[in-house]
Amino acid sequence: MRLQWEEVTPEQTDWKRQINLKYREGFLEPVLGSVVLYDDDSLYDVEETWQCVVDGSIGYLNADTEDAAKNELLEKLENHFETEIERCNDILSSIMDLICKEQEEQI
């Protein structure tokens, strides 16, 4: 497996830092998720908080450091992909049921 953290220019102006977790396989380098350092004095009465971005959704982290934020993101990604695998298995099962039903109808 080729996972790599990469700090990039933040995509939003209120993000102070953005660190993407990429999966490298050949020429493909999809971003699995990101940790971002959010800079806003009005949020929770602190200047900076760590957030994560997974599949386009922003989540708040209880992290005080970059390493803690990365670890929380990894936990969130584990849950995210377990859910995606379950969903894909359900879809595959439905497809197999449909194939069997169509084959029975042809008999």
Image: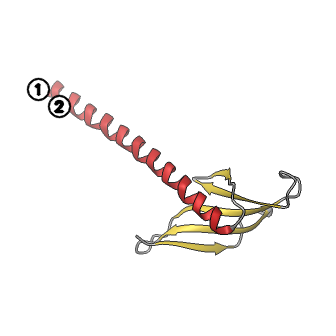
Q: Position of residue 94 (x, y in %)?
A: 32, 34
The residue lying furthest to the left in this view is: 107
Question: On the image, numbered disc 1 is attached to which residue?
Answer: 107
Q: Position of residue 84 (x, y in %)?
A: 45, 46
Q: Nearer the viewer, residue 88 or 43?
A: 43
Q: Which mark is residue 103?
A: 2
Q: On the picture, is 81 further left or further right than 106?
A: right
Q: Position of residue 27 (x, y in %)?
A: 44, 74
Question: What is the quadrant of the N terminus in the image?
Answer: bottom left
Q: On the picture, is 70 further left or further right than 38?
A: left
- Badge 1 amino acid: Ile
Q: Which of 37 and 32 is in front in this view?
A: 37
Residue 87 in the image: above or below residue 72: above
Q: Which residue is drawn at 85% across and 61% down?
A: 47
Q: Residue at x 32, y 41 (%)?
A: 92
Q: Nearer the viewer, residue 105 or 77?
A: 77
Q: On the picture, is 98 further left or further right than 35?
A: left
- In three-dimensional space, the C-alpha distance between marks 1 and 2, rounded to whole angstroms, equals 7 Å
Residue 7: quarter of image: bottom right
Q: Do the residues labelled 1 and 2 touch (CB within 8 Å)?
A: yes
Q: Residue at x 69, y 59 (%)?
A: 63
